[in-house]
Amino acid sequence: MTTKDLLKLSTRIFTARKGRTALTVLGMGIGFGAILFLVSLGYGLQGALLQTITSSGALMALDVAPNEQDGKLLTPAAVDDFKKIAGVAGVETSWSFNARLKLGGTGSDANAIVATPGYLDLEGLKIAAGKPLEESSSKEILVSSAIGKIFGKSPEEMVGQKISFALLAPAGQGSPDIGADGYTIVGVTDGEESTFFALTDGLAIPADVPYAKVKVECQSSDVLASARNAISQMGFSVSSLSETVAEVNNLFRIVNIVLGLFGIITLAVSAIGMFNTMTVALLERTTEIGIMRSIGASRMDILRMFIIESTLMGFAGGVAGIILGVASGQIVNLIVNIAARYMGGKSLALFSYPIWFLGFVLAFSIFIGFATGIGPAKRASGLDPLEALRSR
């Protein structure tokens, strides 16, 4: 029997038993669609979370905080020591102050981060409106979206507003408050805390005020661990965003496995339905198999015909699953984002579909089709031609 004849006979199931075949393919599609829906949700949430906490520069930096219990403060001398560590590309500094903002006739308390331009780059701030601060932004500030809500303005409305602020002297120090007028809001960052960011230029920070935090930028990821150990040995608290990212990835790896297991349960039920379909097809075509064997078809021809049928059905189920999984994910994502925008939130891509995973779903569907067809195919190829003809 030629390959053309095998393919022609194997595809008859899609036309001779349209309703049953369509239901079987739909069942397989629902199973694979469930896996794709759940796992893509895991990947989407993982991507959304990482997008909010990372930037390419932030992954190469160490966050260093003072250890006040041991009397380790972030002073210019400590910063100089950090710069001498092998593999360190630079050190960016920041101060933190309680502050008082004034926009028009309205005032509000806030937290001020006064830093070097490089510090803000490594902070990985997400700009919701406007632009980030640049080295020449001596009379410009960034504010969080939470401050915009306090003043009753959207992020877009906040950009370009004139604002003044006062940095309150740290408790226990005799330094006077630092006033600043005539500043312009050039950007709004995502954030739920009332925080604004300004550059050190133009602000006379007293020399006795220690840094609140510094960022140590490393030349490559290979030196992150050694630089961290060196700073820790100096007595300072050190953390790395790359470690947080690794923990998030490990957590979502487990989440994706659990979600995939739930989908596999649905797929197992669908695979049983497909096995049942192939078994029924065998019983219905027993006489036909006897006729084919009597006119010269070999056992291998019968075996290949049934396996091709089940494999094609599995492939169709995989395609249906991808369509159902992607479509259902996009519908849910649209509904959630509409609700989020209505409630004043931000739109997010809750589902992510890696190409490799789509390929895996399709390949796995072909394998399931092949595997569920082996049993009925062996039974069909093992039928005695005479007994098959008598079953009529």
Image (cartoon, grey):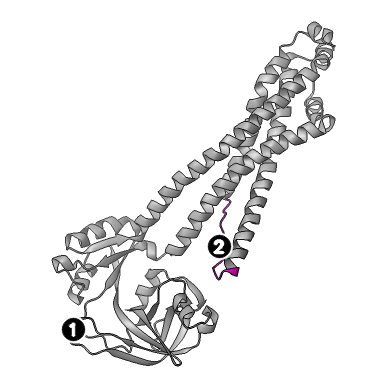
Q: Looking at the image, can residue 293 be seen?
A: yes
Q: Is residue 243 left or right of residue 151?
A: left
Instruction: Confirm whether the magenta stretch covers residue 226.
Output: no
Q: Is residue 69 left or right of residue 125?
A: left
The percent coordinates of residue 208 (x first, y second) are 18, 82
Identify residue for label 2.
348
Amino acid at dot 2: Leu
Give the quadrant of the C terminus.
top right
Q: Earlier in the sequence, mark 2 or mark 1?
A: 1
The percent coordinates of residue 387 (x first, y second) are 79, 7
Q: Secondary structure at mark 2?
A: loop
Dot 1 alpha-carbon crowd within 10 angstroms: few under 14, some 14 to 19, many 20 or more: few
At x 17% / y 59%, what residue is drawn? 233
Identify residue for label 1.
173
The percent coordinates of residue 34 (x first, y second) are 61, 43
At x 26% / y 66%, what residue is drawn? 64
Q: Secondary structure at mark 1?
A: loop
Dot 2 alpha-carbon crowd within 10 angstroms: few under 14, some 14 to 19, many 20 or more: some
Circle on res. 253: none
Instruction: Confirm whether the magenta stretch covers residue 350.
Output: yes
Amino acid at dot 1: Gln
Location of residue 12 by image quarter? top right
The percent coordinates of residue 35 (x first, y second) are 58, 42
Task: Using the image as rendered, state which of residue 228 and residue 221 is in the foreground.
Answer: 228
Q: CA distance from mark 2 to mark 1?
A: 45 Å
368 is higher (above) or lower (below) than 157: above
Q: Is residue 224 left or right of residue 288?
A: left
Write the start and end of the magenta stretch as one range: 342-353
